[in-house]
Image (cartoon, rainbow, N blue to C red):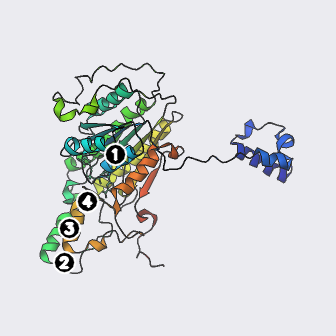
């Protein structure tokens, strides 16, 4: 076979997405040697729908870490609702805003989306199993689990993925400022206790492990599977609790008549890792190790889920202004050094929760149907470079 012909045959294989063994032995004569039929055989590219369409229509979604009003979890819940999700479970261990603010506001703004609020510890096995069961019983499906809940080292005093992303101290800090800055410093690993380290792993890693363990089998259910009939939320589930007024709003009625047909198994598992899970110098050791561990969970799980249609990905934010980083931002504002925030990344600013949520929507939707096993930074470019002065070459 001449070089030209084999190159054409390769083009034929590629354009038809066929493995070599599936190419007809006479493909060379029937398709390739005739340049007209070669052109004809190149398929029209698949043109996806505009990304302004409702990208999550019909999907049943669970998100953890949604109580914080400025957090990534609640920002994602809003964007998931904007994109037409069928039902969203907003979950958190804290409930200061969950039932009183987030659930009613989301329900009012998006009446066609079922908003369920659940208060539980994301690292509690029974609770995670229950919320997944609840979604399956009500809707017969689970499409997306966004394991987003997380904590920072209590020792840091501020909490965040920072070794601040560009929060330089004022040139000569006054004694009070110096004390404040010292309080915001994370502990060195030599000063961490085993219980502090284990707590970090428990909340940030066990929660993701449990979410993977229970959510991914649920994502394999399709409408053809026999499903349990829901007549009421079972009382043995921890949530909603026995006092329905705190946890059950009108739209939490029995939904067993509203199951959307799901014909193909599959789903999207997403977790929030961090740039601190990718590189050093972005957080304390315990936090960084926990965020690296969840990336590994994503990578190993996606291989164990091979052929199932379930994708697993991690989002790696840089410095984002949320409840977790509030003290850092407030401290900088008080010191008048706010303009220094984010100066070590090429975009020279901190990120917003909704900028992370945009990636969560993409990963949750079919638009990311070939994105699997990845740890995707949303960090203004921080993790792209080696340390250096931003904007100065060489
Ligand atoms: N803000 C940043 O700069 C940044 C950067 C990288 C990664 N992250 C990660 O993003 C995720 C979301 O954090 P955020 O920035 O929105 O902070 P946030 O503090 O605003 O929100 C985190 C939420 O998680 C909840 N939570 C904590 N422990 C929980 C548990 N055991 N069970 C259930 N809920 C729990 C908190 O109550 C809170 O509502 C976290 O995993 C965090 O590590 C944040």
Nearest the viewer among 67 and 205 is 67
Provide residue 390's location: percent of width, then percent of height: 41, 75
Q: Nearer the viewer, mark 2 or mark 1?
A: 1
Mark 2 vs mark 1, CA separation in Å:
40 Å
Q: Residues within 10 Å of mark 4 (few under 14, many from 20)?
A: some
Q: Residues within 10 Å of mark 3 (few under 14, many from 20)?
A: some
Mark 1 vs mark 3, CA separation in Å:
28 Å
Q: Is residue 132 above or below residue 278?
A: above
The residue to which callout 4 is attached is 325
Mark 2 vs mark 3, CA separation in Å:
13 Å
Provide residue 381's location: percent of width, then percent of height: 43, 64
Nearest the viewer among 248 and 173 is 248
Q: Secondary structure at mark 4?
A: loop
The residue to which callout 1 is attached is 77
Q: Residues within 10 Å of mark 1 (few under 14, many from 20)?
A: many
Provide residue 34's location: percent of width, then percent of height: 86, 47
Residues tagged 3 and 4 counted as in contact (Cβ below 8 A): no
> Does the residue tagged 4 have its C-beta within 8 Å of any atom of ligand 1?
yes
The residue to which callout 2 is attached is 173
Q: Secondary structure at mark 1?
A: helix
The residue to which callout 3 is attached is 331
């Amino acid at each position: 076979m001449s070089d030209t012909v084999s190159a054409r045959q390769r083009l034929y294989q590629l354009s038809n997405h066929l493995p070599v063994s599936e190419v007809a032995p006479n493909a060379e004569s029937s398709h390739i040697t005739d340049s007209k039929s070669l052109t004809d055989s190149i398929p029209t590219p698949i043109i996806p729908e505009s990304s302004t369409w409702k990208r999550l229509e019909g999907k049943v979604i669970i998100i953890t870490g949604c109580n914080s009003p400025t957090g990534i979890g609640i920002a994602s819940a809003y964007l998931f609702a904007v994109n037409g999700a069928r039902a969203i479970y907003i979950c958190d261990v804290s409930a200061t805003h969950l039932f009183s603010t987030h659930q009613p506001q989301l329900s009012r703004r998006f009446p066609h989306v079922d908003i369920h609020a659940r208060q539980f510890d994301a690292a509690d096995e029974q609770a995670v199993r229950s919320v997944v069961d609840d979604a399956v019983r009500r809707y017969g499906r689970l499409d997306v689990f966004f394991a987003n809940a997380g904590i920072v080292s209590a020792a840091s005093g501020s909490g965040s993925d920072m070794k601040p992303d560009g929060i330089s101290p004022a040139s000569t800090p006054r004694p009070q400022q110096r004390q404040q800055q010292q309080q915001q410093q994370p502990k060195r690993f030599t000063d961490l206790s085993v219980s502090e380290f284990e707590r970090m792993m428990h909340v940030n890693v066990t929660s993701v492990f449990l979410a993977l363990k229970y959510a991914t089998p649920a994502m394999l259910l399709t409408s053809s599977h026999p499903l349990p009939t829901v007549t009421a939320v079972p009382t043995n589930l921890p949530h909603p609790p026995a006092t329905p007024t705190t946890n059950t709003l009108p739209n939490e009625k029995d939904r067993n008549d509203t199951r959307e047909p799901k014909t193909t198994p599959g789903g999207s598992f997403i977790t929030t890792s961090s740039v601190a899970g990718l590189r050093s110098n972005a957080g304390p050791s315990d936090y960084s190790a926990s965020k690296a561990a969840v990336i590994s969970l994503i990578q190993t799980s996606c291989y164990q889920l091979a052929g199932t249609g379930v994708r697993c990905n991690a989002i790696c934010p840089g410095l984002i202004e949320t409840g977790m980083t509030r003290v850092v931002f407030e401290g900088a504002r008080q010191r008048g050094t706010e303009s220094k925030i984010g100066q070590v990344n090429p975009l020279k600013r901190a990120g917003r929760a909704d900028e992370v949520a945009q990636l969560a929507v993409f990963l949750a939707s079919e638009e990311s149907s070939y994105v699997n096993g990845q740890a995707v930074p949303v960090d203004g470019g921080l993790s792209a470079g080696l340390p250096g002065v931003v904007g100065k070459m060489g």
